[in-house]
Image: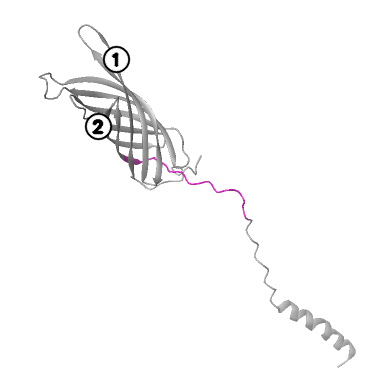
Amino acid sequence: MKPRALLLYLVCVPQALWAQAPSPALPLEQAPVSLATTRAPTLGWAENLVLSAAAGQLGEEALYSFHLAYFPTQRLGLEATIAHNPSGSTHAALHHVGAVVPLLHAGRLRPFVVAGLGTIQVFPGTATNAKSVTKLMLHAGGGAQLHLRGDVALRVEARGLSAVDQQEDHSGFLGYAQWSVGLAFHRRLRASSALDRGEGS
């Protein structure tokens, strides 16, 4: 082989072999690790049907109540309540409806305010021959639900009740204080969205 041909062979062949050789695999770029704390998912109430059972006091007497609420949006719910006050000589039945407004949209603790109207019916019992009396009632108050899990929450609330006292010789309001503690059971009527979970704006 001539010297010139040998030189071309030594130069060109290694270059061709290098071009055909596979490139070494490069290490995959690692995703940056975020040190920011991930925000805990929130528990939305939109499209929730909520059934609550509670026990407490109306004034100084025992009170047992059931609440059924529906939340068409995250910030507003409609609630119907029936309650019974089984005192000794007289007892009372309460029926009222109201609007429930959650105050916060974060975490497991969900404070709320509630206000509405209804009736209170007082039964004198069998000791007297008096008839039952029904009065218009306004109520307002607030409380909180602490979610033990997504569909069960501990419910605590307090309300002020004002019954319209319309007599022949006078008129006014009779005030009552009420508090109760119970459990609330949530049932979502549709799949949750990112906005319901607090991931949206």
Residue 48: in magenta span: yes
The residue lying furthest to the left in this view is 129
* Residue 78 image offset from top left, x and y in percent: 33, 32
* Residue 144 image offset from top left, x and y in percent: 40, 35
Above or below, comparing residue 69 to residue 115 in the picture? below
The residue sitting at 41% across, 32% down in the picture is 112
Q: Quick one: label 2, few (<14), some, or many (20+) residues within 10 Å?
A: some
- Foreground of the two, 181 or 9: 181
- Amino acid at the residue labelled 2: Ile
Asked whether disc 2 touches disc 1, contact meaning CB atoms under 8 Å apart, the reply is no
- Foreground of the two, 189 or 171: 171
- Residue 1 falls in which quadrant of the image? bottom right
Q: For mark 1, what is the residue?
A: 173
Relative placement, left or right, of 172 versus 100 is: left
Numbered label attached to residue 76: none
In primary-sequence order, the first of circles 2 and 1 is: 2
Q: Secondary structure at mark 2?
A: strand
Residue 42: in magenta span: yes
The residue lying furthest to the top in this view is 169
The residue sitting at 64% across, 65% down in the picture is 28
Q: Secondary structure at mark 1?
A: strand
Q: For mark 2, what is the residue?
A: 82
**Residue extent of the magenta highlight:** 33-50
Rounded to the nearest angstrom, the CA distance separating label 2 from label 1 is: 21 Å
